[in-house]
């Protein structure tokens, strides 16, 4: 066992694993299970809090009193950061792609309710200058006497990846309790940090399972590079590294659809279908696209080599509400 960095306890863990019996029966393929990381909390629900447990601990150790991060207007990560800042009595500044005239609903509403400050920027600035803009905001806050800590998009950074190292340790123990082994673990990929942690733990725990990511933006090449960078950042925290090649990082491309946070009818219909079939609500940005992709890969016969597949539900429920008019 490696000695992981310390973390602050914020999430309701471990999250349970459920068997999707009706979906499995309909597909007539591998056994499909789901890990309910959408139930890590309420204000901090989803996968982001696992990363933030490690990130915020590091920030507190550095005596920081302000968290700066970024995302879209409906960012789950930004909302979770605002919630944690409020809980700890420190400030939060969210640099968001969008404008303040957007409807105050979903994650944006909750972030406002939680007391976050906002800086809205254009899509071009977000894509090309978001880290620079956050660093400028940090300097501005420092002149006002604060000590800010900058968190990149999605909390995807070396220290944050240990959130999903911990999740893989949970899965490892739950397999023993359930009496099964998951030979494939599938997640959505939007910034790479969740995948990086699972991949690292899978290697260091000597597991035989394959970790698949289904990207919801950009392409596989982009995320292989991003994940590799995060892995390299994570190694110094444990004074260890794993040997890997880019071919070890498995990204299933082809399900981005219209683009990040844009929904096609077939994706929304699938979310509707699964809600009625299994009583589980996916979100349109991450898990809806990823599970839609997994089901289609099973239908194509591309997952026939796997017996037990675990899909990790990374949350995002609040992102459903701004798109509610598109469902019916």
Image (cartoon, rainbow, N blue to C red):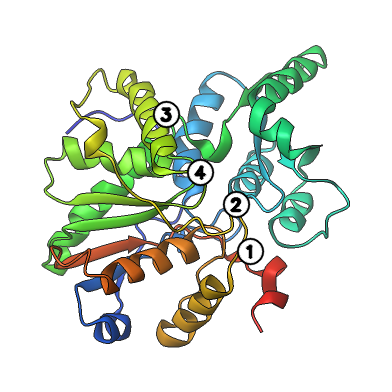
Image location (x, y in percent) of residue 10 = 49, 47
Task: Identify the element where label 1 is drawn.
Answer: helix
Residue 140 vs 44, above or below: the answer is above
Q: Earlier in the sequence, mark 3 or mark 4?
A: 3
| Pick the front one: 10 or 280 | 280
Left or right of 244: which side holds 77? right
Q: Earlier in the sequence, mark 3 or mark 1?
A: 3
Say the numbered circle drawn on residue 76.
2
Q: Are marks 1 and 4 in contact (CB under 8 Å)?
A: no
Q: Earlier in the sequence, mark 1 or mark 4?
A: 4
Task: Identify the element where label 2 is drawn.
Answer: helix
Q: Please tell me in which quadrant of the rendered image residue 298 appears.
A: bottom left
Residue at 43% from the left image edge and 40% from the top image edge? 192
Q: Are marks 3 and 1 in contact (CB under 8 Å)?
A: no
Residue at 79% from the left image edge and 39% from the top image edge? 118
Q: How crowded is the residue under tag 1: few (<14 C-alpha within 10 Å), some, or many (20+)?
A: many
Say the numbered circle drawn on residue 159.
3
Residue 7 at least partly seen = no
Residue 264 vs 222, above or below: the answer is below
Q: Please tell me in which quadrant of the rendered image residue 181 appears.
A: bottom left
Say the numbered circle drawn on residue 318.
1
Residue at which label 4 appears: 218
Q: Are marks 1 and 2 in contact (CB under 8 Å)?
A: yes
Q: How crowded is the residue under tag 4: few (<14 C-alpha within 10 Å), some, or many (20+)?
A: some
């Amino acid at each position: 066992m490696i000695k992981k960095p310390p973390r602050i306890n914020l999430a309701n863990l471990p999250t349970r694993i459920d068997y999707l019996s009706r979906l499995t029966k309909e597909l007539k393929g591998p056994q499909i299970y789901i890990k309910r990381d959408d139930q890590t909390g309420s204000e901090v629900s989803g996968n982001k809090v696992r990363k933030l447990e490690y990130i915020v601990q590091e920030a507190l150790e550095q005596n920081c009193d302000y968290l700066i991060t970024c995302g879209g207007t409906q960012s789950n990560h930004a909302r979770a950061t605002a919630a944690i800042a409020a809980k700890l009595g420190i400030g939060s500044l969210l640099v968001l792609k969008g404008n303040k005239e957007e409807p105050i609903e979903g994650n944006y509403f909750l972030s406002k309710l939680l007391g976050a400050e906002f800086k809205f920027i254009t899509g071009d600035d977000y894509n090309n200058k978001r880290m620079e803009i956050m660093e400028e905001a940090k300097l501005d806050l420092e002149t006002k006497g604060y000590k800010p800590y900058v968190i990149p998009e999605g909390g995807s950074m070396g220290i944050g990846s240990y959130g999903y190292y911990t999740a893989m340790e949970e899965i490892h123990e739950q397999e023993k309790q359930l009496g099964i082994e998951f030979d494939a673990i599938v997640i959505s990929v939007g910034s790479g940090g969740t995948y990086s942690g699972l991949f690292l733990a899978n290697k260091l725990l000597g597991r035989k399972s394959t970790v698949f990511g289904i990207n919801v933006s950009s392409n596989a090449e982009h995320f292989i590079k991003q994940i590799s960078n995060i892995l390299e950042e994570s190694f110094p925290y444990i004074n260890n590294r794993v040997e890997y090649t880019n071919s070890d990082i498995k990204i299933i491309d082809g399900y981005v659809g219209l683009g990040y946070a844009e929904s096609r009818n077939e994706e929304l219909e699938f979310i509707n279908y699964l809600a009625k079939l299994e009583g589980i609500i996916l979100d349109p940005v991450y898990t809806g696209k990823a599970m839609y992709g997994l089901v289609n890969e099973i239908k194509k016969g591309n997952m026939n080599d796997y017996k037990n597949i675990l899909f990790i539900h990374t949350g995002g429920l609040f992102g459903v509400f701004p798109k509610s008019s598109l469902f019916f």
